[in-house]
Amino acid sequence: MGSLSNKRPLSCKFLILLHLILGMGAVFGGFVLILDPSGGIIKMPISILEHSPFDNFLIPGMILFIILGVFPLIISFALVKRWDWNLANRLNIFTKMHWSWAYSLYIGFALIVWITVELFFIKGIALVHVGYIFLGLMIQGVTMLPSVQKHYSIK
């Protein structure tokens, strides 16, 4: 049994869950868009890309799959295991925090930017967009909780 300082607070478990939800949803959505760049599988009309730089959903699907799918899944695992990863540490601007904590903030920000850019290109908004903006804000807010910061601080 670990010491009290290593016990994971409920807030950290919730943060891990948020990353798992984002990651699994984006892996699925990105994979479907890569599989069918016309958007036909999920009945997403190609016409919504009219004001975007894309002719189909292949590139957005790849970005969704990797950045908002695979990365959050890696981060959720790293939030559990807290392993050292030199490459990730190089981009960690919060040197007193474990890299997974920093990347949690990065992913929350990336999600908010992704949805904002998507809204700009499609010239519309749906409830799902509001939900994902809220998820991005939740990831950032929970990451900034004192109990989470304490748990992931480098001693």
Image: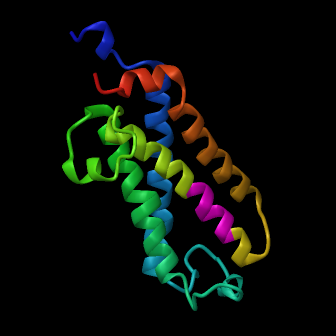
**Total marks in image:** 0
Q: Eyeballing the image, is 69 above or below 9? A: below
Residue at point 36% right, 45% down?
Answer: 75
Furthest toward the right, the residue is: 124
Q: Nearer the viewer, residue 41 or 58?
A: 58
Characterize the magenta stretch by its predominant secondary structure.
Answer: helix
User: In the drawing, does residue 12 fall left or right of residue 79?
Assistant: right
* Quadrant of the drawing holding the C terminus: top left
User: In the drawing, does residue 42 fall left or right of residue 5?
Assistant: right
Residue at point 64% right, 52% down?
Answer: 132
**Where does the image place residue 39, in percent across and percent down from the top left?**
57, 80
Q: Quadrant of residue 48?
A: bottom right
Q: Quadrant of residue 70?
A: bottom left
Q: Nearer the viewer, residue 40 or 25?
A: 25
Q: Quadrant of residue 42?
A: bottom right
Q: Eyeballing the image, is 142 above or below 77? A: above
Furthest toward the bottom, the residue is: 55
User: In the drawing, does residue 33 fall left or right of residue 72?
Assistant: right
Residue at point 49% right, 60% down?
Answer: 26
**Where does the image place residue 90, in percent across and percent down from the top left?**
28, 52
Q: Eyeballing the image, is 28 above or below 135? A: below
Reply yes or no: does residue 1 show up in magenta: no
Residue at point 58% right, 92% down?
Answer: 55
Q: Eyeballing the image, is 2 above or below 82? A: above
* Quadrant of the drawing holding the N terminus: top left
User: In the drawing, does residue 133 fall left or right of residue 54?
Assistant: right
**Where does the image place residue 6, in percent across and percent down from the top left?**
29, 16
Q: Which residues are magenta?
A: 111-118
Q: Nearer the viewer, residue 119 or 18?
A: 119
